[in-house]
Amino acid sequence: MGCGMRKEHPKQCDRVSLSVPAATGECDLSSLEINVCFLNTSFLLAIRAALLIQRWYRQYVARLEMRRRCTWNIFQSIEYAGEQDQIKLYNFFSFLMEHFTPASSERKLISHIFRENQVCRDMEWEHYFCYKSIEVPDGYTGPRLTFPMTFCGVSKLVEAFKHKQQLHARYVLQLLGETWQLLRILPNINHVSICHTRELTICGDLHGHLEDLLLIFYKNGLPSSEKPYVFNGDFVDRGKNSLEILLILFGFLLVYPNNVHLNRGNHEDHIVNLRYGFTKEVLGKYRVHGKKILKLLQKIFSRLPLATVVDHRVLIVHGGISDCTDLNVIARLDRHKYVSTLRPPKQSLQSASSRKTDDNWDEKPAESRRRVYSLTQVRSTPTHKHDLPRRSLQNLPQRDQLHWSVEMELKKRRRQAGFDQSYGDLNKSDFDSGDTENDDPEWKQVVDLLWSDPMPQNGCIPNEVRGGGCYWGPDVTEDVLGRHNLQLLIRSHECKQDGYEFCHNRKVLTIFSASNYYEVGSNRGAYIRMGPDLNPHLVQYQASRTCRERTLRQSVGWTERSALRALREQLFVHKSDLSSAFQEFDPNNTGLITARDWASATQSVLKLGLPWRVLRPQLVSSTKQGMVDYQQWIRELSYTEPHLEISDTSILETMYKNHSNLETIFRIIDTDHSGLISLEEFHQTWKLLSSHLKMDISDKAVEDLAHSIDFNKDGVIDINEFMEAFRLVGVSTQE
């Protein structure tokens, strides 16, 4: 034996003897024996296999994560496109109100949504919303409320809603009336202090998801003097239990006015509710008294506080901030004026139009210009507004109406109407033509608080994705927090896959409490626990038991299929535009285009900003040698359509493409909330829509459509039945 180990490879568990004298320390390896067991070939192979499995698993998880993010982008892009559509339509209505005569039929149809609720003036609310004449029948089995509200009473209300019971309209109106009285005396900014013995719980968007609110109460406990809560807006819309959530929150607010705090969100707005379901929900549950409930909720929404400050260090708002956010201004403004934040209050418009300015915006130095807004910038008043002719669409022939109202008038005043994307490409100068003196700075402050989103880049730019508020960067966060001696901004407004997200060097925290927002399994919900140290502790959850039982692959696959189904619906309703766009890349009419051209054409039509080349294999199966057979693909975008005798089938595509806009107009025209409109009102709806879309829809096509859907020939159309008949219910063959 030598002084080293043997060079030959040992067999399984070969042993080598080495010895060293214990006393003398001499290097005599023969006196020290150490048993060394070497790895055999099979063990080395096992290690190699484990490394290969680990690498495969990491790639597998990475692919799932890529699919999850792509699915998320689809959902979010479609959601934001809908919000942008909503604001464009509302801006169109605003334009009609400002530039057409009061006698015009179009103006009359929509004027009521812009009026202050005259019957709801503070001195008259008790008379209009009197609940005392409403009898509760003996057979009523739901909860019976007593006032003043108590913890026991609200707890029973929570249990009743948990078991799907409905509160009687008398109690609903009484509860809302008490809430309105309390909100009138609350400040614009609530100030909360956390003592050493309790934590503050902060919840984000709930959007009608009652199961999420109940789960939060189960995990965290009901609101009380020892367990204060802040609910950060967007209680309503999208979900099916928005009213129940409001009644529960208002009940706890009445019992614990110093420990339950509600911030207003951008969906606490009666105009937004017309599109996203809350109006329909209330009228469906309370057919007799639904109209009164909605009118009272308009008043309540306008009285909700705009922000909450915790221990003078943490700011909580629904949307965000901008480079001109000033909490001192927000604290002083009269928030009840903003019944809808989509438009400045009437008195502001009048005072703005009464001021005459000869200054040209383009001649001012750059440092004197305000940044561009998306919602707020569109209200700038033209310098010579009194020189504009006031015309009525009704006084002109059909073609002249469209020519005047769209081609001339709307183009001439598109900046005031806010058509930044619907009516041609506008550059920045199209917006930078207003005078800052005509702006309503308080309204802009409110819009930014409710609509804005953070971005990773420095600066502050219009939020053109949503159509309202701004995008603000880390530098704006530093500036606003520094000016007000704050350390953290907590906001909601954006759905996050994990229920929360930090940004801007962890100085901005987004919290979202509606799990399964887009689809079951699409996202978790979360809420914040904050102690005296003001460090946010996040709690995540998933309200759906089905989702909790699924594997990661099953969950991703389920939500991916749902997102692709929604995307195919968008492709289907734009198939004529897509066909035209594809043909531009196919001058020889071969029916084939490259994958790159397919992606470019699809993006140019839908404008959703999605990775179309990545999505193509899941959307397109008709390929030949790497080329897309777009003609076959368009034929495969098949959905079940109603079989109606209509002379002009193009109106069906317009119907599908503008389904939400059309339903919104129907809800506006249905002033008595009966759910029924006459054939004449049906015609007026399409006239408004055709003007908004800048297209000519023939009277014959509208008449055919109306008579085809009026099944019992009574001269009225049920809105819900009509919209449901034209909802896409088929499944694409690609699914």
Image (cartoon, rainbow, N blue to C red):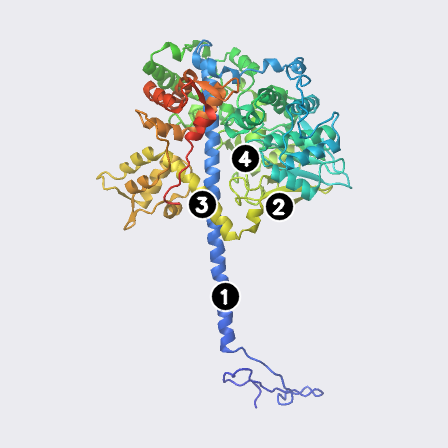
Mark nearer the viewer, 2 or 4:
2
SS assignment at label 3: helix
Q: Nearer the viewer, mark 1 or mark 4?
A: 1
The furthest residue to the front = 139
Give the CA distance from mark 1 to mark 4: 42 Å
Q: CA distance from mark 1 to mark 2?
A: 33 Å
Label 2, label 4: how far apart the Cα atoms are: 22 Å
Kindly state the secondary structure of the residue where label 4 is placed.
strand
Label 1 CA crowd tier, 10 Å (few <14, some 14–19, many 20+)? few
The numbered mark, 1 or 2, whose residue comes first in the sequence reads: 1
Q: Give whichever of discs 2 and 4 has the lower sequence position.
A: 4
Q: Quadrant of residue 583?
A: top left
Nearest-to-viewer mark from 4 and 3: 3
Residue drawn at (51%, 70%), measured in percent from left and top?
Answer: 47
Residue contact at pointers 4 and 3, CB within 8 angstroms: no
* Distance CA(mark 1)–CA(mark 3): 32 Å
Where in the figure is residue 26, as x and y percent of width and height?
66, 87
> Disc number at residue 453?
4
Is there CB contact under 8 Å for labels 1 and 3?
no
Q: Secondary structure at mark 1?
A: helix
Q: Residues within 10 Å of mark 4 (few under 14, many from 20)?
A: many
Of the image marks 2 and 3, the number of the one nearer the N terminus = 2
Q: Nearer the viewer, residue 657 or 498?
A: 657
Residue 540 disc label = 2
Dot 1 or dot 3: first in sequence order is 1
Mark 3 neighbour density, 10 Å: few (under 14) some (14–19) many (20 or more): some
Q: Residue at x 41, y 28 (%)?
A: 658
- Look at mark 1 in the image and give the residue it sits on: 51
